[in-house]
Image: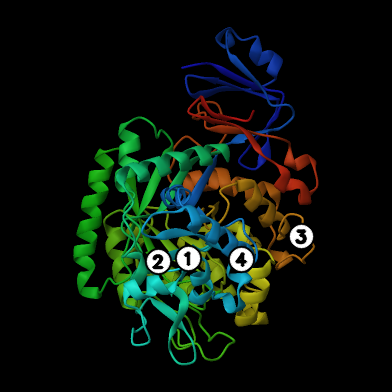
Amino acid sequence: MATLLIRGGVPWSDGAVLDGDAVLVIDGRIAAIGSGDALAARDDAAGAGVIDAAGGLIHPSFADAHVHAAMAGIEALGLDVSGAHGSDACLALVGAYAMTHDGPWIVGGGWHMSDYEGGTPTAAALDAVTGDVPAFLVNADHHGAWVNTAALRIAGIDASTPDPADGRIERDAAGVPTGTLHEGAMALVERRLPPVSPDAARAGLAAAVATLHRAGVTAWQEAIVGEYGGHADATPAYRGLIADGVLTDRVSGALWVPRETALEGVPALVADLVARRDANAVAGLDTSTAKIMVDGVAENRTAAMHEPYVVDGCDCGGGRGIAYFGRDVLVAVATALAAEGFALHFHAIGDRAVTDALDAVEAIPAADRSRRRHHVAHVQVVDPADVPRFAALGVTVNAQALWARNEAQMTELTVPILGERRAAWQYPFGSFLRAGAALAMGSDWPVSTPDPWQAIHTAVTRREPGSGAPPLNPGEAIPLAAALRAYTAGSHRLLGVAGSGVLEVGARADLCVASRDPFAGAAQDIAVTRTVVTVLGGEVVHREG
């Protein structure tokens, strides 16, 4: 393995700037940190490849604690409308795609709820550009879908179709479906979509890996592994790339716990997950985490809240959203999986969902609870009484920090239905740190950009880059060092990636060079930082230019 000398930069690790300006890598490990001239003069540095950091930050690589890489890669093969802003621009892209597409379905996504009244576009609008070809477009947050009349017809969805227990069909005043499907209702159409071929799945995942490397990410957790909402299980693609030696990153996956799990089905569920975990381990894929989606999302009123939303006319869990598991089932699932050595990865958006997740962890016997690092992702609305419970229970905050800012979806769709008091409880990262909670970060890509610097910018400023909007709950901002530490050391530790996430002698050489030193500039400039070099196990896997 090649020797590598990165010099002329600012070494940083685990919250602090280190002495020197260079890092020496030998045989995939960090051999020394110090003066570039001194390291270059060492006998064991002879013949080293040299990278000029040009004053940029040299830091541990990022670990993404919540990402859907397989889904992102596959979606990139289809119709992507995420760059379109406004309904007209979106429909123009769909129409252009439909003109040249000859497949049986139009499949894609990335549309923004804030571009449509109430966040719910209509089948009639989509019909105008797709005609009789069935169309299914998932929205940017992947908790809703826009379908046309042909898709509704093929799925047999009409006024007599009941809402599934874990979702809602958007309807007009007469009860006729209008074209937007929320949460579990998406599956009514998704199950009719053409399957993704194994070759396409592997190609998509390989492309996603390259994207993550460009972002400086060398470790991640695939946040859903298993069949979910019409999406195929990503396990074969991961195992295939590992077997071929293409995937050498520090990857883990969270096995999906179906939302329809009943109390009597818990033993069979656990047995199935244990068998899959053990088989994957033999193949080199760590799936010793279980994913439990406790609720939906706030903007479509499916996040589980303690008190009703500030709206009328919504039949969604009595006006308090949807809790996908009864508390008895949630506790039974959590305790049984923890007893088998699983880490628990909860999706929790609403304050009731956060409470339920913490209650489930608290119900786990202390000996089992301490075996693994359990974590709650998203934590959008958190009752202040629950903030100190994270540290007390040893539960890690898995933050998707990019969302903690005022933009159209927040100001037009979310804040009005939360009300002033609960809107002030959103994304309380500062409160978590002050209470001693462990903090990790993830992107939720393709819901959000996989670029950690964009999320770090928002965690520090509580603003969208370049936005003149006021910061969202500015008292919950955190320092740059804390945010970068969460996305490096914090996420590596959460995912159990031994020997990575820090720059220290003997550590595995998973590291990055940034385009600049963000600590030397203003906070509003953090977002212009780019990853220009990514090193995985001593090998350069991305180099800009």
Q: In x, y percent, where is residue 368?
A: 32, 58
Q: Position of residue 378 (x, y in %)?
A: 52, 63
User: As shown in the figure, which amino acid type bears the numbered disc 2?
Assistant: Pro
**Side of 105 where 437 appears, left or right:** right
Mark 3 is on which residue type? Answer: Ser
Q: Which residue position holds label 3?
A: 467
Local crowd size for mark 1, using a 10 Å CA cut-off: few (<14), some (14–19), many (≥20): many
Q: Secondary structure at mark 1?
A: helix
Quarter of the image for the C terminus: give it: top right
- How far is disc 4 from disc 3 in space, using C-alphas? 19 Å
In this view, the residue in front, 256 or 274, is 256
Q: Residue at x 52, y 41 (%)?
A: 212
Mark earlier in primary sequence (1, 3):
1
Q: Residue at x 68, y 56 (%)?
A: 458
Q: Element under label 3?
A: loop
Report if the CB atoms under discs 1 and 2 are less than 8 Å apart. Answer: yes
> Of residues 159 and 58, which is closer to you in this image?
159
Q: Label 2, on which residue?
A: 134
Q: Earlier in the sequence, mark 2 or mark 4?
A: 2
Q: Residue at x 24, y 46 (%)?
A: 278
Picture quadrant where residue 15 is located: top right
Expressed as whole percent of the image width and height from the top left, the position of residue 91 reads 57, 64
Numbered badge on residue 130: 1
In contact (CB < 8 Å): disc 1 and disc 3: no
**What is the spatial separation of the Cα atoms under label 1 and label 3, in whole angstroms?**
35 Å
Please name the residue that numbered disc 4 is placed on: 427
Query: Is any atom of residue 437 visible in this view?
Result: no
Kind of element beneath mark 2: loop
Q: Which amino acid does the dot numbered 1 rest on?
A: Thr
